[in-house]
Amino acid sequence: MTASAAVTPVAETTPNSNLTNSNNSKGIAWASSPLGQARNANVAKFRREYETANIGPDSGYNGNRHFVSLHIVVLTHQAICLWLLYRSTPSLHDVPWAGATWTIVLSFLLANLCEYAKHRFDMHHPLSKSDHSPVHHRYFTANSMYLTTFNAGKAIFFRVSFVLTLFYIIMPIPALILNYLVFPTCGYYFLLTSTSYYLQYEWLHLIYHCPPDSIFGRLPFVQYLRRHHRIHHHQPLMRTHNFNITYPLMDVLFRTSYTGPPVFSEEMDMTPPPAFVQHVD
């Protein structure tokens, strides 16, 4: 999601009402049309260029190291919060259960809103400096959703520097304010909920781009969420629909959850599950 590609980005595709309102057979026909085949060829070409320039053997990048580093940063942050929470409320009798419950629920909803707003109004804004659209949406399309190497996680995961800044510099500020204004441990519950939500974000987003027959991909609720996200990767819809990555609560609230006719089928994917363990030549 936050990788830097050494290729020329392209502008996002604007919605096409004729395609958006097509039925499933027309969607499949479009994928096999000259335009659809050309787009698939462009995706394959982009993947080769991106992998050579950014995640190849000479790049020094390691997807496993990136993923583990993100967990170390977040789990360390959570350990600190739990330690501070324990110091403040060493006994279960001291826990403000009602306040803690409300804080967790409201923090979860706020995280869902922030995910939605950043994705819709920042990452897909025409003037955005994010490489989300020119990299993530060119590497992964509705017809090419699967990873071909775990190093392609560079096009999915947030940078470690961003996560460090967010959770160790920015987020403690509202947490301290909550501790002062609401109740003394409110900020710790806020931080624990926020970091837990973030880990769900990274895991679910990764699973969406893994083969659907993988151990996690077979879970029923994951299949629904993957379809929701895959529709967002259909280029005519990516600036207008399905902005939630985790749970589409705000998509439902703001009526941006796509409810029209199907725009793809599982048979359309140009990267079959076996490609997950291979490298693109």
Image (spheres, rainbow, N blue to C red):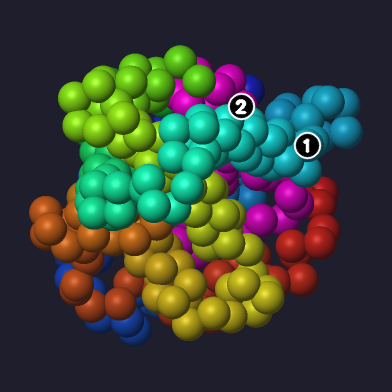
Residue under label 1 = 65
Does residue 106 show up?
yes
Q: Is 18 rendered above or below residue 25?
A: above
Where is residue 176? Give x, y as percent.
Answer: 33, 21
Tell me the crowding category of disc 2: few under 14, some 14 to 19, or many 20 or more residues within 10 angstroms, Cα based: some
Q: Is 37 rendered above or below residue 1?
A: below
Where is residue 177? Give x, y as percent.
Answer: 26, 21
Residue at left offset 32%, top offset 81%: 24
Instruction: Out of 255 and 112, give the one closest to the viewer.
Output: 112
Where is residue 11? Give x, y as percent.
Answer: 35, 33
Instruction: Out of 68 and 55, give the one closest to the viewer.
Output: 68
Specify whether residue 233 is painted magenta: no
Residue under label 2 = 160
Residue at left offset 45%, top offset 24%: 166
Tell me the element at label 2: helix
Question: CA–CA distance between discs 2 and 1?
Answer: 11 Å
Left or right of residue 253, residue 215 in this image: right
Residue at left offset 58%, top offset 62%: 207
Q: Earlier along the polypeptide chain: callout 2 or callout 1?
A: 1
Q: Pointer 2 and pointer 1: residues touching (CB < 8 Å)?
A: no
Mark 1 belongs to which amino acid? Arg
Mark 2 belongs to which amino acid? Val
Q: What span is colored magenta in the figure?
A: 138-167
Q: Is 231 rendered above or below residue 215?
A: above
Instruction: Out of 146 and 192, give the one closest to the viewer.
Output: 192
Tell me the crowding category of disc 1: few under 14, some 14 to 19, or many 20 or more residues within 10 angstroms, Cα based: few
In which quadrant of the rendered view does residue 25 lie? bottom left
Q: Is 255 rendered above or below residue 6?
A: below
Left or right of residue 234, residue 8 in this image: right
Residue at left offset 44%, top offset 53%: 92
